[in-house]
Image (spheres, rainbow, N blue to C red):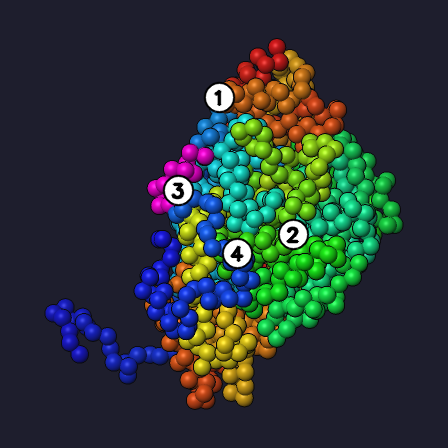
Amino acid sequence: MRYLPLSKQDRRDMLAKVGVEHIDELFADVPKDKLLSDLPELPLHAGEMEVEQRLSRMAARNLSAGEARGFFVGAGAYWHHVPATVDHLIRRSEFLTAYTPYQPEISQGTLQVLFEFQTQVALLTGMEVANASMYDGSTATAEAVLMARRVTRRNKAILSGNLHPHYRDVVQNMAHFSGGDLVLCDPAFDGAEELAAQIDDETACVVVQTPDFFGHLHEYSELAKAAHDKKALLIVVVTEIVSLGALKSPGEMGADIVVCEGQSLGCGLDFGGPYVGLFATRQKYIRQMPGRLCGRTVDADGKSGFVLTLSTREQHIRREKATSNICTNSGLMALAFSIHLTLLGEKGLRHLADLNHANAARLAEKLADIKGVELLTRRFFNEFTLKLSRPAGAVVDVLAEHKILAGVPVSRLLPGEKEAENLLLVAATERVSERQMDQLARALKEELA
Amino acid sequence: MSMNRQGRKTQPGTPEESLGDQPTHSGNRGLLIEEPLLFELGDTQTTGVDLPDLPESAHDNETRFGDLARREPIGLAGLSEPETLRHYVRLSQKNYSIDTGIYPLGSCTMKHNPRLNENMARLPGFMDIHPLQPQSTVRGAIELMDELAHWLLELTNMKAIALSPKAGAHGELCGMMAIKAAHEHAGHDQRNIVLVPDSAHGTNPATAALVGYRVRSVPAQKDGTVTAQSVKEALGDDVAAIMLTNPNTGGVFEREIVEIAELIHEAGAFFYCDGANFNAIAGKVRPGDLGVDAMHFNLHKTFSTPHGGGGPGSGPVVLSERLAAFAPVPFLLHDGEDSRLIENAGDVGAGKLHPFGRMTAFHGQFGMFTRAMSYMMSHGADGLRQASEDAVLNANYIRASLSEHMSLAFGEDHICMHEVLFDDEFLRDTGVTTLDLAKAMIDEGFHPMTVYFPLIVHGAMLIEPTESESKASLDQFIEVMIALTRDIREGRSEVFTAAPRFTPRRRLDETGAARKPVLRWSPE
């Protein structure tokens, strides 16, 4: 077996050194009748060629974004172009096969990357500090609500109806088990939502998203003031990080915690993961923050260096009193995010954001002209909602047969929501060509005729 | 000194000619290159990508977004492509990695990460598919998840699986939520206590607290194991579950685990097993046979997905018959020839299934599923079993080889599983601490073992070589460890207290870092 270096002779010699005759003597603590005498009923070992064949056969059963005649699927994960350099670098042994940087003297590479990542995230979100990443945007949102409860010592969270439904479900699940109160607002398909009036003296936080799930852009400065008047926190969620290249940051609007899905930079689509959650807040709350933090310090020779810090918040020290049970971050994806953003730079990010919007605007124009299509999102970034004359799920399925992935039927995430049945979320990134837009428009026109 | 005809030396100079520790002009030392921060290197006008021009139809930012347009500069630094490569390659060279050498971090399982896995995860059919494409266009992805589920259930003899948890601690959370959901379903609201041995990993009590349970500590024996008797004494009708790691955090198999499971079940509670150390027993023992109700895997430990400098992990959870109905969404449902992903709790109707909610957006760490599947297919049933045996053999080989030189935490006759635990008894009155020894190992070119964990042992040193180390590598490690213990006995404590000396940075001021946290770069 190619991954196991011990030879039969090695094993014999080593057993002799240990002073046993058979390997099972080292499993002596296992109750006798529980030690398997037979192999599990699974296939035996296979060479590289065979594994490649078996897995390639499965991969070939999927319609990949590149094979599709048009790809317009978003709803929290976007098909952006990732420069070749990113993947090359994250495959370097020293990044790929290192552990969490617990021994800082031999982990300065990972640590400096995290410090730079934290800075990039803070700048992008307009916040003072950021952590070294979370699992993804949805779990980061649940952690943000827990943090707001700790900071305010209040229990109630108000969730915008236009928060990504999966995010809402994750927050709701966490609240159910951890004993938090939630106010779940109904979706506002037109983007008009009145949240300020619901904030009271028991409110820990209000959770909103921009661009929201339906693509609407929001100015939350007024809401931030309303929340602060009641000593509640404003949590702003961003699921398309590229939008921050063109739009005012949540920090500028007065957000107290910003959580984002960072997938758009550096990560692939990967059928949903691994992605990277971004978490940023104000300096004064750092001791209530979840997740890993990298800090700058000096070494014994007075040279600047980096360490993981403020670990007294974490589970391995605090156990049941920890701020979170999280034991890891999304290190490699944070690295990918950081490299991609370094390659783009401010100039590139702004241009990329402009391209995304320009493509989406052009697509929206083409689609809105079709009979049976109504554009619901007036101000959007790279994704918008269409109201079709028929249920969107069936339309998407038919178009998929023609290898056009037209978008996400809203009903897939909001089942049972009668008014959502005909709604279709359509996204356009820099990868979408004019030809693909026309193909979608043609196919949609035919299908709705 | 011999010279060639160009007057160039053909042999290195004598020690007298060397300049020792004198600084260089650049601050670099050969291959050890000082690398400034990205923000000190780049600027906001540099970019390393060529993007298409904007279409002429595009409007300016103000017209498009009005008051929402970004007006202020962000301050993000950019680098050209060659500068980017150099920056990150130089940084990477300041890291130790599995591919550099033995990485014997106990409980972390730093095994070889096969590159076939990386290639398989990057097949466009796996990498470039969206979690919300119509399921009819991702049959192969669902097949892969189904296949992975089959292998994991077969290896554990369990009934159901939740693939979506994002990491080990997230898997624990998922398992404990399933347990709480089952109690809620049965109307057992008075059960609010979780038993956790004091030898447990910190995530266990943290997880129990997160789902609203209170922790009752169960005293561990000297070797960290728990007896049926001590569990019996802690049990009551207020107990919801026990969380037990097996093999435990000291590398010892819980001898009374079957009796403990029976007691737990008789008391109407559930048995959560922390599967962090499943790599010791995969293919040898099935947790389902022991009476486990829920267990998470760390795909990044047992099934070789890369640790990536701290994630991403992946923590699927297997569930027993008693808990099978309480998995979160999404889950796989067999439906004729193909399986279907059930994404919403409402989709199952009123029946036998009671999904408790959602752990994360989308379907979990699919990229890690592909890697783990590639690893398991490569090993097969026989290879997985051999890997467990080799992991256990390697740990015991280190135990036997170092027993006379260091102090085994549980005595010389105590076999271990995949990792071996030493305490700091052999360092007593030497002026050298566990941390000092760890730092001296760094100077010798090794990554240290896990130190000061588990907490039940003074100055703990937990060594987990994994099955990936050859005998030659182990022998070299052992030889150096013996030499270091000789240095300690001979009173050469400065080798240890001054260590590490040959690293990009020497010991760092962690207290200062925590007292005045600097968590980001700021412009002067």
Are circles 2 and 4 on residues that touch, CB within 8 Å? no
Q: Is residue A50 magenta?
A: yes
Q: Chain of mark 1?
A: A
The quadrant where residue B235 appears: bottom right
Q: State the SS at label 2.
A: loop
Which amino acid lies under the numbered mark 4 shown in the image of this protein? Val
Label 1 Cα neighbours within 10 Å, binned few <14 / some 14-19 / many ≥20: few
Q: State the SS at label 4.
A: loop
Q: Which mark is residue A51?
A: 3
Q: Residue at x 55, y 46 (%)?
A: B153
Q: Which mark is residue B285?
A: 4
Q: Which mark is residue A435?
A: 1
User: N-terminal of the two: label 1 or label 3?
Assistant: 3
Magenta range is A46-58
In this rendering, the answer to whether B298 lies above or below B406 is above
Can you give x and y, in whole percent of width and height, for residue A362 in the image?
Answer: 57, 24
